[in-house]
Amino acid sequence: MPAPTDDAIVDTFKTRASAALADANLKLAIDRTTRTARAKREAAVAAWPGFPEARDLGRRIKDHVIENLDHYLLEFERNAQSSGAIVHYAASAGEACEIVLRICREAGAKTITRSKSMLGEEIGLPHALDAAGFTRVETDLAEHIVQLSNDRPSHIIWPALHHTRENIAALFRTHHHTPQNSDDIIGMVASARRQLRPGFLGADVGISGANFLIADSGAICTVTNEGNAELTTTIPRVHIVTAGIEKLVPSLTHAFILLRLLVRSATGADITQYTTFHCGPKRAGDRDGPEAFHIVLVDNGRTRMLTEGLGEMLRCLRCGACMNHCVVYNEIGGHAYGGVYPGPMGAVLTPVLDGLEKSRELPHACTLNGRCQEVCPVAIPLPAMLRGWRDKSWAQGLEPRTQRGMMGLWAFAAAHPSLYRLGTRLAIRAIRLLAKGGWIDKLPLAEGWTRHRDFPKPAAQSFFEQYQATRRKQD
Amino acid sequence: MNARADMLAAIRRALPGERNPRTIGAAAEALARESIESRPQIPGADLTEAFAARLVSDRVVGASIDRVNRLEDAPGAVRRYCRIHSLDPVLALQPDPELQRLDWGAFEIRPPTGGDETLAVARARWAIAETGTLVFHSGPESPTLLSFLTLHHVCIIESSRILAHLEDYADAEKGAPVPRNVNLITGASGTADIEGALVRGAHGPAFVHAIIVGALGQTP
C-alpha cells in the first residue's frame, strides 16, 4: 500500500478542525453545554461515596458479558422470542438498514417515528429511511433540531450541542407551525411539543435503540428524559429496536448497576425521568402497545473488535463523559471528527467503522492527558487504545511521508549518539539566533506553535553539554 | 441470511474455550450481589419519608407530593390538586380495580388512552426511595400511555409499596411474569437538549404529583 500524500488525508481532518476552530459561535455552543455537563457530573459523583466501587463493579459486569457474549446472545434471543419478539441479526450497517426497511415496507408504513439511538446513526438509518421514501419524524428534541437543520449529530448525548439557543429559535420560527413567542428555552421546548405531537399519534412504525438488552427476560431498556421513546414505541403498530450486541446484560439488577453509572456520567442526574423496559408486543387485553415487536441485533465490527484486541471498547455505555472532558473535543466539537462517534470514544471506534486509512488522524488528535479514562464510568483505557491505533497506523505505513521521513531521521540520529549530540548542539545555537529578549515569536518549521504563543529561547548549551561540563569539574 | 451463525462463530473464534452456563450464571449472580456495597445511601430509616423528601428535592424535576391515610381519601387529594392548579375536575382514570371502586363522583371520568386529557390518575405498582421513582407495569388494567400523554400525572402509591433501592425492585419481581412495559418514572418529562439547560414538560407530563397513602398517623 503506498503511503498517502500529505494533503490527501491530513487535510480533510485538518480542514474540518481549522474551520471549527475559526467558528466562534461553535465554541460558544460547545462551552455552554459541556461546562454544565462537567459540573453536574462532578457533583453527582461527589455525592455518591460508593462511586469508585460501583465503577469497578460496572467494569467487571461489562467484561463478564463480553467474555461470555455468545452465551448471553443466545439467552437473550431465546427469552425475547418467547415474549413474542422477532429477533433479526445484521452483520453490517447495510444489512441492518435493509432489515428495518423490509419490516417497514411489509407493515405498509408511511410515517415512521424514531427516538434517539446512536446505533441508528451508526448504521445510517435516518438516511436510509429518507432514501426509501418514508416520512421520518425524529422525536428527540435534539434530533428534531438536527433534522430541521439538515445536519448531523455532534455529540452522543446532546446531538444538537453545536447549535446555540439563538440558532434553534430561528430554526423553529422557520419550520414550526406555531412557533414560540419568545426565544427562551421553555418556549422553544413547548413549540417542539406542539409540533411533534401529531407525528407521534399518526405514526405506523416506531424505531428505538436500546441502552440495555436484558438476557434473562428478553426485554430491552430505553433511557430518556423527554418521554419521546415511550410515545414512539407504544403508539405505532410496529416497534423496531436496533441495538449493538454489546448492550447485553445478564439481568435487571445488572442493568440497574450500570444505569447509575451511565446517567451520572452522562447528565449528572441520578436517574433519567424515564427508564423503560420493553418486552415483546401487545398482550391479550392490553389497551395499547405495538402489535409487532422486532429486535435487530447488529454486529457492524463488534465481533471484529473482540478479535483485534479492542474488546475493552465494548464496555462503552455511550455516556459521552469522555468527550465532555476532552480538551480536543471542546475546541473542535463533534463534526470535525468526521465519523458518527466523536471525542475520545469516537477516535477509537471510527477506525473500526470507517477503516483506519480514512480516520488515522483521529487517534493523533489527542493530547493523551488521560482525562477520558479518568471519567469513563467503566474505565475504558482510551489513551492506550488510541496509542494502539497510532502503532497500527505506523505499522501499516499509513503515516504521511514527511512524518515517516522525519521519524526515520530522528531514529537514525538516536542510534548514533555523537551525531545526535552534534545535531542538538547546532540546533540550539541556530534557534538562539532567532530570539529577542528571551523569546522567539516566529520559529521556522514550527509556525503552528509560534502563531499562538512565543517559544522560549533555549539554554546556551544542551543538557548533555552541561552534564559533561559538570562531570569534568567533579573529576 | 447467515448473520447469526457468522456472529456466533466470530465470537467463539475470539473467545476460545468451553463455557459452562452454570459457572457463568454463578459469576453473574455474584456480581449482582456485590452492588450492596456501593449503592447510594438512603437518608434515615423510614422509606416513606426518604421517598417523599427525595421526590420534592432538587434531584427530581417537577414533582410534588400529598399524603393521605387511606386509599379512600385519594379522590379528595386529587380534588385538592385540581384546585391548586385550577384544573377542571376531568380526568383519565387508570382502569385499576382498586381505583375504580373509589368514589370519583366529583369528577368527569374519561377513557384512559384518549390522548387529549389534561390530568391522569393512576396507582403505581412500586416506588423507589433511592431515586424518587414511581414504577408502573403495563397490562389490561394499566395502559402505558396514561403516564405519557397528559400534562398532569397524579400517581397514587401505598407506603407499603415503597422500596429502598433499584435492585430491590428487581428482587421484588424476581420470578414473576415480565410485563410488556415496565415504566420507571422519576419526576416530570424534561429535556436538556438546548444548551444543557433543564426544562420540564418535553413530550410527557410537565407535572408529576404523588399521593402517598398510609403511614400518615405514624409520622411525627
Image (cartoon, coloured by chain):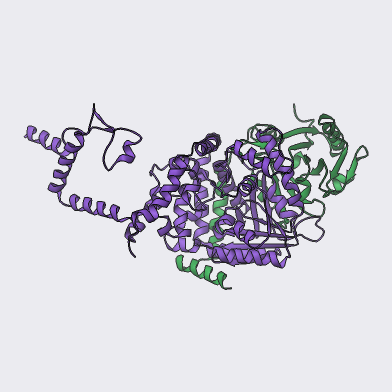
Chain colours: A purple, B green
**Residue pictured at 51% horizontal, 51% vertical:** A341
* Drawn side of residue B191 relative to residue A47, left or right: right
For the residue pair A463 and A148, the one nearer the viewer reads as A148
Question: Which residue is found at the position 58% from the left and 52% from the top?
Answer: A254
Is A153 left or right of A409, judged from the image as shown? right
**Quarter of the picture holding the C terminus of chain A:** top left
Asked whether the viewer can see residue A313, the reply is yes
Q: Position of residue B207 (x, y in %)?
A: 75, 37
Q: A313 and B51: which one is in front?
A: A313
> Residue placed at 16% from the left, 44% from the top?
A423
Residue at the front extreme of this rendering: A174
Q: Residue furthest right?
A: B105
Q: Nearer the viewer, residue A374 or A63?
A: A374
Quadrant housing residue B65: top right
| Residue B155 x/y as whole percent | 78, 40
Q: Quick check: can you spot residue A462? A: no
Q: Indicate left or right for A413 with A206 as reference.
A: left
